[in-house]
Image (spheres, rainbow, N blue to C red):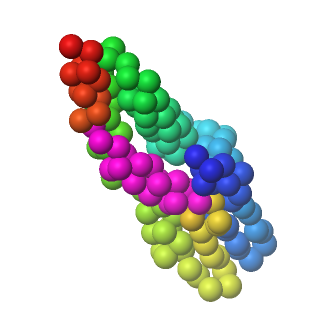
Amino acid sequence: MIAYIPANIYPMLLTSTLTDRSESTIIGGVVELVEYGSYGVALIVFIASVVIPVGKFIAIGYLAISVQSGSSDRQHQKHRAYEVVEFIGRWSMIDVFVVAILSALVQLDTIATVNPGIAALSFALSVIFTMLAAQAFDSRLIWDTERKTT
């Protein structure tokens, strides 16, 4: 979660043209997409960059706390939440890939350049850390609480 904070504060994309230089944060990019009328793309970027990462943090935290407390409630839902976090983990890097591809494609020397900002690295680290946290979580602990109570 610590790496996710600078991912939202600092610019994700640095764009330079002959006449202008701009920096876009994740939320700033969503707002710009809405202003240009690209509601669908803005929604996809918002879900992929804000909703899913925050949901993953909440799900991993909930699983860790419920296993530590020994709660045997809703074990099937907990296991399903774990599987969703595992599945989404590999798709969470799509934002970083888009920035990398855009940076590689738009390099017109002095006319226009697009470069990743520091937020791209922070976002990538945040995604990697959540993937590692999900991998390190032993899903068998969800079911071990049932054995202890019986």
Q: Does the magenta-highlighted stretch encompass residue 133?
A: yes
Q: Nearer the viewer, residue 147 or 119?
A: 147
Q: Residue at x 39, y 54 (%)?
A: 132
Q: Residue at x 63, y 76 (%)?
A: 113
* Residue 115 vertical position relative to residue 111 in the rendered view, above or below: above
Q: Main secondary structure of the magenta part?
A: helix
Q: Residue 102 at what x, y percent from top left? A: 50, 67
Q: Nearer the viewer, residue 75 or 101?
A: 75
Q: Residue at x 63, y 60 (%)?
A: 119
* Residue 69 vertical position relative to residue 36 in the rendered view, above or below: above
* Residue 29 vertical position relative to residue 20 in the rendered view, above or below: above
Q: Quadrant of residue 31?
A: top right
Q: Residue at x 56, y 80 (%)?
A: 107
Query: Considering the image in quadrants, where does the C terminus appear?
Result: top left
What range is drawn magenta here?
Answer: 122-139
Q: Residue 97 at what x, y percent from top left? A: 43, 63
